[in-house]
Image (cartoon, helix red, strand yellow):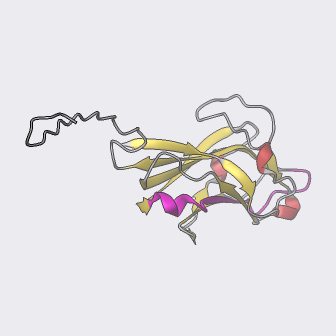
């Protein structure tokens, strides 16, 4: 199997208080606990709103069998579950719950996986949506510092350059002259 990591490259909507995809760390991977300190966040006015980000298209894989979305988040004093969803091939999949117990005062990682059979063209408009918890509370925020996706291909050769094959052919005519 081969994998490819893709990251946010645009804001699909602008619902949360602080939403800019440029504030999502673009070099950190799970389980790293470091980052550049930037974040997006939902406050009390953003409860149950789904912030969506566009993502890079696939550049090496030609097919996919699963997508795992990683989120580094925190929500000290925030109640209620959040949710994550993905858009593949122009269709939003079934969202998955991010349990309230997975976040607190410190940042923590959570990941959710979708399985299927897709082509690279299905990832041209790939997007991720995060729905804010339903009870953020006055003076509190639900914060995300990292969101990225790892796409897995069932093809073991996917994502690798094809080997260079050099062929030499000798052509002779009736007079045994080489070309």
The answer to whether one can see residue 77 in this image is no
15 over 31 or under it: above or below: below
Residue at 48% across, 57% down: 120
In depth, the one of 25 and 178 nearer the eye is: 178
Residue at 43% across, 53% down: 62
In the picture provided, is 11 more to the left or to the right than 170?
Answer: right
64 over 38 or under it: above or below: below
Residue at 40% across, 38% down: 160
Percent coordinates x, y for residue 73 in the rendering: 70, 44
Give the residue at the far front of this rendering: 175
Percent coordinates x, y for residue 102 in the rendering: 63, 46
Where does the C terminus fall, quadrant-wise? top left
Residue at 73% across, 31% down: 35
In depth, the one of 81 and 120 nearer the eye is: 120
Instruction: Read off the magenta span.
Output: 119-140
In the picture provided, is 142 more to the left or to the right than 59?
Answer: right
Question: Which quadrant of the structure image shows residue 131?
Answer: bottom right
């Amino acid at each position: 199997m081969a994998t490819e990591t893709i990251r946010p490259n645009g804001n699909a909507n602008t619902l949360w208080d602080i939403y800019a995809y440029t504030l999502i760390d673009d070099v950190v991977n799970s389980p790293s606990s470091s980052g550049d300190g930037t974040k997006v966040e939902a406050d009390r006015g953003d409860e149950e709103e789904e912030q969506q980000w566009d993502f890079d298209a696939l550049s090496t894989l030609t097919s996919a069998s699963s997508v795992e979305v990683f989120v580094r988040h925190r929500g000290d004093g925030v109640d209620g579950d959040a949710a994550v969803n993905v858009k593949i091939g122009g269709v939003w999949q079934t969202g998955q719950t991010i349990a309230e117990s997975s976040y607190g005062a410190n940042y923590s990682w959570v990941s959710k996986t979708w399985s299927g059979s897709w082509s690279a063209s299905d990832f041209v408009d790939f997007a991720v949506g995060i729905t804010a918890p339903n009870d953020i509370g006055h003076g509190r925020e639900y914060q995300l510092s990292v969101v990225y996706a790892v796409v897995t291909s069932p093809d073991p050769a996917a994502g690798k350059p094809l080997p260079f094959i050099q062929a030499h052919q000798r052509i002779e005519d009736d007079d045994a002259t080489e070309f």
